[in-house]
Image (tube, rainbow, N blue to C red):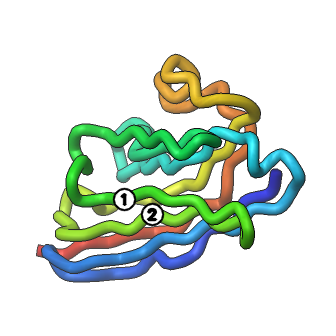
């Protein structure tokens, strides 16, 4: 699976952004996919993930503000981000891992996850 993110940018607090991740490769449909982020000087953290059956999981910090979705027909993973806060500022990475989502694999900064995009920067100003 190859992943290419887009949609990052700069917004003011309270604003919205939509990140997209274009995926190639036949494993896309059965992969667990999601988003990580990393802010300067901080560890990489899991933001959201979606399983092949559509089950989603969100970090507490983004629950109720971010929505992850997946369109298998056009192979796009999206992250709709609402009510953005300065603490959401980070590089956001699209991630895909074969098989069903496994919470253990998505811990430890995602060190064992197989496919990563190059990242897209999100900056939220106060």
Residue occupying image coordinates x 18% and y 64% = 86
| Residue drawn where x is 52% and y is 17% of the image | 104
Counting residues from the start of the chain, the first of labels 2 and 1 encountered is 1
Q: Are marks 2 and 1 in contact (CB under 8 Å)?
A: yes
- Circle on res. 79: 2
Tell me: 97 left or right of 19.
right
Kindly identify which numbered label has been placed on residue 89: none
CA neighbours of label 1 inside 10 A, class few (<14), some (14 to 19), many (20+):
some
Report how far apart the C-alphas of labels 2 and 1 lie in the structure: 6 Å
Q: Position of residue 39 (x, y in %)?
A: 36, 51
- Residue ranking furthest to the front: 53
Q: Position of residue 25 (x, y in %)?
A: 87, 55
Quadrant assignment, res 112: top right
Furthest residue in direction right, as rendered: 26
Can you say whether 60 is above or below 84 in the image?
above
x and y percentages locating residue 125 in the rendered image: 19, 75
Residue identified by numbered label 1: 67
The residue at the point 67 percent across, 56 percent down is 117
Furthest toward the top, the residue is 104
Q: Is residue 26 left or right of residue 9?
A: right
Is the residue 98 above or below the residue 73 in the image?
above
Image position, residue 11 (x, y; %): 27, 82
């Amino acid at each position: 699976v190859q992943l290419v993110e887009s949609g990052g940018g700069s917004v003011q607090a309270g604003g919205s952004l939509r990140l997209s991740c274009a995926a190639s490769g036949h494993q896309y449909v059965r992969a667990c996919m999601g988003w990580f982020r990393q802010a300067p000087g901080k560890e990489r953290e899991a933001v959201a993930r979606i399983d092949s059956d559509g089950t989603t999981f969100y970090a507490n910090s983004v629950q109720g503000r971010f929505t992850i979705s997946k369109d298998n027909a056009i192979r796009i993973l999206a992250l709709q981000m609402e009510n953005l806060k300065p603490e959401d500022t980070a590089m956001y990475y699209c991630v895909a891992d074969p098989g069903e989502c496994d919470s253990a694999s998505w811990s430890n900064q995602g060190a064992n996850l197989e496919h990563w995009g190059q990242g897209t920067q999100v900056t939220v100003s106060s």
